[in-house]
């Protein structure tokens, strides 16, 4: 597998404190003071979206979400199958299609309806998920503590940070957080940083590593966050909260727009010149 490091992330030193909690030390992140406002929930997806395009993140908070896509549906189904494998054991080839249909019926029917897939198209999706499942089974599960771990923290009044971590491993040198991707790995550093910060806020301890792993390609991106990097992410989240609340207070309907690959499925694309230009450039290439 190819491994890249996020060592290029700016290090800002040991901006931290520790507090005694029983007989152990507990990490304390200095989450910045933020402007007061209505309750705000920040997920890893919202933070990553904001880092790419602030206006797209503002649209999400106003209920403008990208349309369901075949790729996202396949990824969601694959993750449900991975979780089923880890909790219930190996899924035999003869039972695989039925297992997929059970998972769809248990929580994905609205997405299936939105896509309007024909039976033959759904069969093709299930086959592709089967290929991903075969690759997933080749991954090591040694040291795995838990899967689909929901983590939440409230570092400031009316500010809730949430994330769902695909897997938590216990390694000899500490905890490793894993995010499994069914597609390629594209600029995942912000998401990994958010998970590391959230874990530190919730548990009071730094994870030893956070990783994104592409099931399809085998590519792996690994970060070993230090306290300075965690503090930097916390500062960025705080700045995002201030930006969003300022927009709501002022009745502002647009923030800075930045074009990129994320524009293709943006629900605001029709009214965004930056996004339209980015899509034209991508199509011409």
Image (tube, helix red, strand yellow):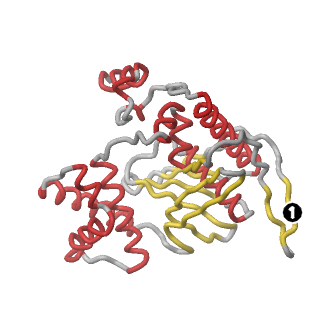
**Residue appearing at x 27%, y 64% in the figure:** 130
Instruction: Report the front residue among 148 and 247.
Output: 247
Q: Position of residue 190 (x, y in %)?
A: 58, 44
- Tell whether 125 sits left or right of 49: left
In-image side of 152 versus 34 (left or right): left
> How many tags in the picture?
1
Does 123 sit left or right of 267 as displayed?
left
Furthest toward the bottom, the residue is 88
The vertical placement of 141 against 79, above or below, is below
Residue 4, position as x, y percentages in the image = 56, 46
- Check disc 1: other Cα within 10 Å, few if <14, some if 14-19, many if 20+: few
Is residue 100 positioned above or below 35 on the image?
below
Toward the viewer: 244 or 273?
244
In the depicted structure, whether residue 272 falls above or below residue 5:
above
Element at badge 1? strand
Tell me which corner region of the image, top left, top right, bottom left or bottom right, holds residue 11.
top right
Residue depicted at 60% across the width and 36% down the height? 244
161 or 207: nearer the viewer: 161
Residue at which label 1 appears:
19
Residue 241 x, y percent position in the rendering:
64, 40
The structure residue drawn at horizontal position 42% and vertical position 35%, both measured from the top left corner, is 262
Q: Nearer the viewer, residue 205 or 117?
A: 117
Q: Residue at x 62, y 32 (%)?
A: 249
């Amino acid at each position: 597998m190819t491994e890249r490091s996020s060592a290029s992330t700016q290090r800002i030193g040991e901006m931290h404190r520790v507090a005694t909690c029983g007989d152990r030390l507990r990490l304390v992140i200095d989450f910045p003071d933020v402007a007061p406002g209505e309750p705000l929930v920040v997920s890893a997806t919202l933070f990553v979206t904001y880092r790419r395009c602030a206006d797209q993140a503002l649209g999400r908070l106003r209920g403008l979400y990208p349309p369901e896509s075949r790729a996202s549906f396949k990824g969601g189904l694959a993750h449900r199958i991975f979780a089923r494998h880890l909790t219930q054991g190996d899924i035999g080839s003869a039972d695989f299609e039925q297992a997929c249909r059970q998972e769809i019926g248990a929580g994905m029917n609205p997405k299936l309806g939105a896509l309007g897939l024909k039976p033959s198209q759904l069969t093709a999706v299930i086959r592709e998920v089967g290929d991903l499942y075969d690759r997933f089974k080749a991954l090591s599960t040694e040291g795995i503590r838990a899967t689909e771990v929901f983590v939440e923290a409230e570092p400031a009044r009316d500010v809730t940070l949430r994330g769902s971590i695909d897997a938590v491993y216990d390694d000899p040198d500490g905890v490793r957080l894993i995010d499994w991707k069914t597609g390629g790995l594209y600029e995942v550093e912000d998401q990994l940083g958010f998970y590391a910060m959230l874990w530190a806020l919730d548990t009071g301890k730094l994870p030893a590593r956070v990783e994104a792993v592409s099931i399809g390609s085998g590519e792996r991106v690994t970060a070993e966050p230090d306290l300075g990097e965690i503090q930097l992410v916390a500062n960025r989240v705080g700045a995002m909260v201030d930006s969003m609340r300022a927009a709501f207070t002022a009745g502002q309907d647009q923030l800075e727009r930045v074009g990129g690959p994320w524009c293709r499925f943006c629900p605001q694309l029709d009214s965004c010149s930056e996004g339209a230009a980015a899509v034209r450039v991508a199509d011409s290439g």
